[in-house]
Amino acid sequence: MINIITVHWQTPKWIEPQLSYLERNVGAPYRVFASLNGIDDGAVAARFHFAADLSGTHAEKLNELAAVAMDQSDPSDVLMFLDGDAFPVASLARWVADTLATYRVAAVRRDENFGDPQPHPCFCVTTAAFWQEIGGDWRPGRPWVNDVGTTVADVGGSLLAQLQERGVEWLPLLRTNTRNPHPLLFGIYAHRVYHHGAGFRSVPTRVDLHRHAQNRPSSQRPSLGTLRTSVVADPSKLLRLRAHHARVAVGALQRTVALRRDARNARTVDKMADRMFAKLVVDPGFYRELDGAGE
């Protein structure tokens, strides 16, 4: 039995697509345990083996659902953690069996998110026995410093520490996109799993925020707007212009262009996400435009 653990938050938008792709691609008996936060519809809840409006963080909900699933599972049963906006796009059952015959855990690792090292719950498979053995925990745990020097604590950090402390080799499932409309969103992993990303909230992602922060104006790195404000506050500055101020003005122009591009990109990504959702609802082969090497 494959026990699928997922969280949907404040909207039923992703329930029908996720359940449809699961039915199409799991290929073995399965049941779905779900946290349905803010989705008060008995007909929707009835589509799951177990559904409840659980409190707490995303990681705490996953931990609680895993405990419920294990109470109803044999040790050899599979636990499959799956974000609400994620689902398989290729057959899973044989691949899961073969993978867990070699590795205790296989999970998405989002290297593209500035080198995040931890197993990510958008897709992760293990057995009930192993999860019980290690006391599996999705909470953030100890933070790390990512590739751009930011200290990060995120879901999956505790699980990474549990695996490292026990010397357990896990299988990272990496992004296999041959086309990337966005560096983090709309990801295909191991040619088998789609993760929309930010399906229950608006962008920006951490990648977008970092790019925007690099372009954010300051007194040392002004934009045209901050220069204008400075001159309006003290017009005499125009009389004190020197040659090096031309470089400042050029930098301000470049920064202003970048900020406007960021604003356009944010609107574009939102529209792109809507288009991708509309396509995946009607076309099970939508993922091929993202991963040309997929099945």
Image (tube, rainbow, N blue to C red):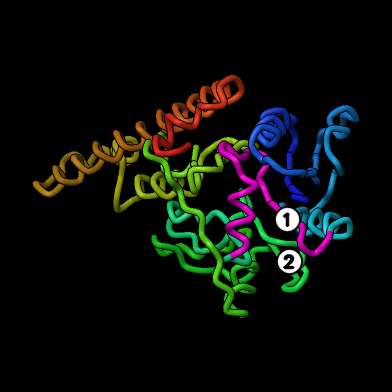
Amino acid type, residue under disc 2 in the picture:
Trp
**Which element type, helix, strand or loop, lies under badge 1?**
strand
Amino acid type, residue under disc 1 in the picture:
Leu
Q: Is residue 232 visible?
A: no
- At horizontal 36% and vertical 49% (from top left) the residue drawn is 214
Q: Position of residue 26 (x, y in %)?
A: 67, 41
The disc placed on residue 291 is none
Q: Position of residue 291 (x, y in %)?
A: 42, 37
| Lower position in the chain sequence, tag 2 or tag 1 | 1
- At horizontal 62% and vertical 37% (from top left) the residue drawn is 201
> In this rendering, is residue 125 above or below 41?
below
Q: Position of residue 44 (x, y in %)?
A: 84, 30
**Which element type, helix, strand or loop, lies under badge 2?**
helix
Label 2 close to label 1 by CB (< 8 Å): yes
> In this rendering, is residue 68 above or below 182?
below
Q: Position of residue 191 (x, y in %)?
A: 48, 43
Q: Is residue 76 magenta?
A: yes
Q: Which residue is mark 2?
A: 131
Instruction: Determine which quarter of the picture holds residue 138.
Output: bottom right
Q: Residues within 10 Å of mark 1 (few under 14, many from 20)?
A: many
Judge left or right: residue 62 versus residue 268: right
**Residue 198 or residue 86, whichever sits in front:** 86
**Residue 70 or residue 161, whichever sits in front:** 70
Residue found farthest to the left: 243
Instruction: Determine which quarter of the picture holds residue 8.
Output: top right
Q: Is residue 178 visible?
A: yes
- At horizontal 36% and vertical 36% (from top left) the residue drawn is 259
The disc placed on residue 79 is 1
Highlighted magenta segment, given as a residue range: 74-101
**Residue 117 or residue 239, whichever sits in front:** 117
